[in-house]
Amino acid sequence: MVVNIHQAKTHLSRLLDRAAKGEEIIIARNDRPIAKLVPITGRERRPGRLKGKIRISPDFDAPLPAEIQAAFEGDED
């Protein structure tokens, strides 16, 4: 569906309801598309959702072996 800016401002709540149901709304100025109103997809972020599922090694921040550190620094010789 394509709407002009005036229609979008006048009927924003209705357009948001339609977008939430999956419809893409194109907003145009002088018949030229300038924006797209689309639904947000994906899961809602919830802190702690992965608790107990991720393990970080106690030495994850230990210094790298010299040869690996040298490679990161560009000293591969």
Image (spheres, rainbow, N blue to C red):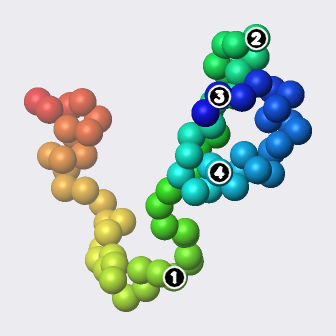
Neighbour class for label 1 at 10 Å: few (<14), some, many (≥20)? few
Q: Residue furthest bottom?
A: 52
Residue 54 appears left or right of 15: left
Q: Is residue 59 left or right of residue 66?
A: right
Distance between the Cα atoms at labels 3 and 2? Answer: 12 Å
User: Mark 2 belongs to which amino acid?
Assistant: Asn
Q: Which residue is mark 1?
A: 48
Query: On the rendered structure, is 7 left or right of 57?
Result: right
Q: Which residue is mark 2?
A: 30
The structure residue drawn at horizontal position 80% and vertical position 44%, both measured from the top left corner, is: 12
Between label 1 and label 2, give the one nearer the viewer.
2
User: Does residue 58 show up?
Assistant: no
Q: Earlier in the sequence, mark 3 or mark 2?
A: 3
In what element is the residue under mark 1?
loop
With respect to residue 74, does 40 lie above or below?
below
Q: Which residue is mark 4?
A: 18
Q: Can you identify the residue that label 3 sits on?
A: 2
Q: Quadrant of residue 3?
A: top right
**Looking at the picture, which amino acid does disc 1 mark?**
Gly
Query: Between marks 3 and 4, how big is the CA–CA gap?
Result: 12 Å
Q: Position of residue 40 (x, y in %)?
A: 56, 53
CB atoms at circles 2 and 4 under 8 Å apart? Answer: no
Return the disc, 1 or 3, that comes first in the chain's sequence: 3
